[in-house]
Every structure is written in structure tokens, then in C-alpha cells.
Image (cartoon, coloured by chain):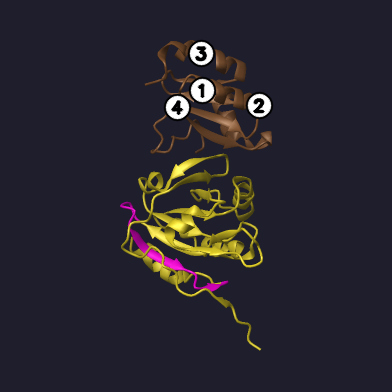
Chain colours: A brown, B yellow
Amino acid sequence: MTSGEPDRPAHVDADITLYRLQACPYCERVVRTLEDLELSYHSRFVEALHGDRDVIKRLTGKREVPVIVDDNTGVTMGESGTIVKYLHKQYRNRGGEE
Amino acid sequence: MRLKVTELGPADHVEVGETAPDFVRPLVNDEFWEDVALSDLVADGPVLLLFHPMDGAFPTTYIYNELLDREIAEYDVQVVGLSISTPYEHKSLIEDRGIEHYRGVFSDPANGVADEYGIAMEMDGMTGIEEPRPSLFLVDEDRTVQFAWVAEAWPKFPDYDDLEDALADL
């Protein structure tokens, strides 16, 4: 795990990984959107201390959460407002990802 | 006067030759935590599953130090811990013990995995808290238990030589 995105565990069949901080309102906003759109997702939790977030830095160049990685489209993206817009645009008319 | 340890007696635990119960819990590494199944790990090779006391307890320190001294990770095995401590405590444990090269530490505050393995014990003097007996299960790619050690006294430490024999036989 020295670069890029670690594989999701094999038992997970979701195509979207959400990097999140427990109780972070911006992360919860993305969670609500994922749930509203009935998208399945896999959570990875990081700690509050930004210095401990190298896995995020490798993904986006920054250390902020939330970040999503969407294997359906190859998109890796931060900023909750941008993510919410992206998810709506990408999935609103699909009634879930299946 | 010789100090006596508390006897726990035998446990009705998962035995060698049996299938290790599968479970999903948050697995903590040095960067993040996520839900992982034991079966996810064995798909990558054998797993040494170490049930240990709360992260701050001295036996936890002793056990990890001994595994490190013996360079257990040099065998073809993924070393995985499990305790009732939270992911935040596991993050500190990984850093304090220097076990970033281990596969991770599962967090199971409700002690349900220990129940599945038949090794749950109540904590005397800590009402409402139970944790696993200190235990080691060496699980192969078929999730079959190849070696099992479960503490029958408190405190009690694993027979590390027997463990190394089992690792060499993998």
C-alpha cells in the first residue's frame, strides 16, 4: 500500500468507496446522497488529524475528506458539494446502480 | 509464597481441523479502517489470528513484542490482531508497537467474534465488559484451523515455539 487506491475487500460488491471521517457533516451529506440514490458504497474511515491521511493525499493530492472513488466511471473526487452534484448527475435517472 | 494465576479452565473453543468461523469487523491499518471479512484475508493466504486483551493491557504489549522478536511475519502468514478496543486505540497500538507491516487489527467492542470462537470471558471488576481469552488461531487458505492456543489461566502467554512449529509446517 505505497501508492494509489488499495483494493476493496473481496466480500464488498459496491463500486463506490467513500473515504470519510466519523461524524464529519460534509461526509454525512455525501452518505445521505448515496442513500437517497440507493447506491451501494464501501466506507473507509480516516482520523481527524490531517497529517495521518496519506491515503487521501495519494488519491487527490489533498488531505481533506470526503473523497469518493467510483469504479463505474473511473472518477476520484473530493469536496462534498462537487461529489453530491456528480452523484446526482451520474445516477439520478438510473434508480440505483444495478 | 508463590503467586498463583487465576485458572480459567478449558474453553469449548474452535479446534484444530475445524473451519474457523467467518466474520466481518472493522480492520484497522496504519492509514484507515474498513469492514473486512476473515474470508477476504484467507483468500490472500494463511492468517495468524491473535485475540488479545484491551490495547492498553500489559499482556498485549508482551505478546506483540514477542511476535516481533521472533519475526513471525517472516513466515508466509498475515498477522492479524483482534481486541475489544476501538479503531482509534488500534491506530495508536499499531504505531506504538511498530506493527505497520502486519495486516491489521480487528475492532470488536461487543466481543461477538470471541463468542463465535468459544473464547469469550467476563472481566472481573469491570461490570458489563467482556473480552476474548488471549488466543491464537492459525488459519489456512481453506479457513481450516491448523494451530490453536487458548489461554486457560489469566494471565497466560502462548507457547510461541509450538506456534513457530505450526508456521513452519504451513
Q: Residue at x 69, y 36 (%)?
A: A49
Q: Could you tell me the amino acid type at mark 1?
A: Leu
Whether label 4 touches label 2, CB < 8 Å: no
- Of the numbered discs 1 and 3, the one sitting upstream in the chain is 1
Q: Could you tell me the amino acid type at mark 3?
A: His
Q: Residue B82's x, y, as percent?
A: 52, 54
Which chain hosts label 2?
Answer: A
Q: Is residue B151 magenta?
A: yes
Q: Residue B137's x, y, as percent?
A: 42, 61
- B150 relative to B75, above or below: below
Which chain hosts label 3?
Answer: A
Q: Residue B144's x, y, as percent?
A: 32, 57
Same chain for the residues at labels 1 and 3, yes or no?
Answer: yes
Q: Residue at x 65, y 58 (%)?
A: B56
- What secondary structure is marked by label 1? helix
Q: Is residue B17 left or right of residue B56?
A: left
Q: Which residue is mark 4?
A: A40
- A89 relative to A20, above or below: above
Same chain for the residues at labels 2 and 3, yes or no?
Answer: yes
Q: Residue at x 35, y 45 (%)?
A: B43
- Of the numbered discs 2 and 3, the one sitting upstream in the chain is 2
Which chain hosts label 1?
Answer: A
- Of the numbered discs 4 and 1, the one sitting upstream in the chain is 1
Report the span colored magenta.
Answer: B140-155
- What secondary structure is marked by label 2? helix
- What secondary structure is marked by label 3? helix
Q: Residues within 10 Å of mark 3 (few under 14, many from 20)?
A: some
- A68 relative to A85, above or below: below
Q: Which residue is mark 2?
A: A25
Q: Could you tell me the amino acid type at mark 4?
A: Ser
Q: Which residue is mark 1?
A: A34
- What secondary structure is marked by label 4? loop
